[in-house]
């Protein structure tokens, strides 16, 4: 039972960070292989920990953004949040599809938190997508554990690097586009002066 609690806590901590770190599924694979834990319990407990971590991240990131990002950009991001809050099932579908792809979910929850989107609304779709994608990763964990050298090389593969770059591009796109002007005036412009 104690190892499952460690899976939960470690997954929570991995997804609590506002920057790119190891994905929570790597923690799940480690504990499952190291201590011969039940794979389904590891996935369930790990995904719940990961979901709690992302929820907490989305709650404290607005305060961090107020310290780091200027007032005008914070208002712009909040405006996007209000627009996203009106889309209902479309936002749920986007979150589900996003979490099914091998992309880090940090930009998604950082953006949702900064925009003050009610995170509780996107958690069900995140939970389903996260469970599905992490299940695929953990179930292939035995192969990865038996091929440690290949796994280490995989962290520097073109897929992992391109996934991280795409996540950064998504986050920067969210931050540097003047969304209020785009949505209200239908004019595209960039604003790189967002930092305090």
Image (tube, grey):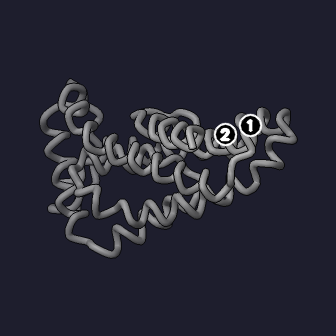
Disc number placed over residue 118 in the picture, else none: none
Q: Residue at x 56, y 38 (%)?
A: 2
> Can residue 164 be seen from the camera position used here?
no
Tell me the residue that label 2 is attached to: 31
Counting labels gives 2
Q: Position of residue 69 (x, y in %)?
A: 22, 31
Q: For residue 172, which quarter of the picture?
A: top left
Q: Position of residue 86 (x, y in %)?
A: 20, 70
Residue placed at 20% from the left, 26% from the top? 67
- Side of 146 relative to 187 (left or right): right
Image marks 1 and 2: residues in contact by CB distance under 8 Å: yes
Between residues 21 and 78, which one lies in front from this camera angle?
21
One can see residue 190 in this view: yes
Query: Measured from the top left, where is residue 73 in percent x and y?
Result: 19, 40
In the image, is 156 to the left or to the right of 16?
right
Residue occupying image coordinates x 16% and y 54%: 79
Q: Among all residues in the image, which is located at the extreme bottom?
A: 89
Q: Is residue 21 left or right of residue 137?
A: left
Is residue 27 depicted above or below 142 in this figure?
above
Residue nearest the viewer, comparing 12 with 195: 12
Q: Secondary structure at mark 1?
A: helix
Quadrant of res 1: top right
Q: CA distance from mark 1 to mark 2?
A: 5 Å
Identify the image quadrant of the C terminus.
top left
Element type at marker 2?
helix
Compared with 95, 137 (above or below) is: above
> Which label belongs to residue 34?
1
């Amino acid at each position: 039972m104690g190892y499952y609690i460690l899976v939960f806590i470690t997954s929570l901590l991995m997804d609590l960070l506002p920057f790119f770190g190891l994905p929570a599924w790597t923690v799940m694979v480690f504990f499952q292989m190291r201590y011969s834990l039940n794979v389904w319990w590891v996935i369930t407990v790990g995904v719940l920990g990961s979901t709690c971590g992302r929820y907490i991240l989305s709650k404290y990131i607005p305060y961090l953004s107020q310290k780091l990002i200027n007032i005008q950009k914070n208002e712009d991001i909040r405006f996007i949040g209000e627009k996203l809050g009106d889309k209902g099932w479309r936002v749920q579908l986007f979150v589900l599809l996003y979490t099914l792809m091998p992309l880090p979910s940090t930009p998604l929850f950082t953006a949702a938190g900064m925009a003050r989107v009610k995170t509780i609304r996107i958690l069900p779709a995140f939970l389903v997508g996260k469970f599905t994608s992490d299940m695929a990763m953990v179930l292939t964990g035995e192969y990865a554990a038996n091929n440690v050298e290949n796994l280490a090389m995989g962290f520097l593969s073109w897929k992992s690097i391109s996934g991280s770059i795409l996540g950064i591009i998504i986050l920067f796109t969210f931050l540097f586009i003047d969304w209020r002007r785009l949505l209200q005036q239908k004019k595209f412009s960039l604003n790189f002066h967002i930092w305090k």
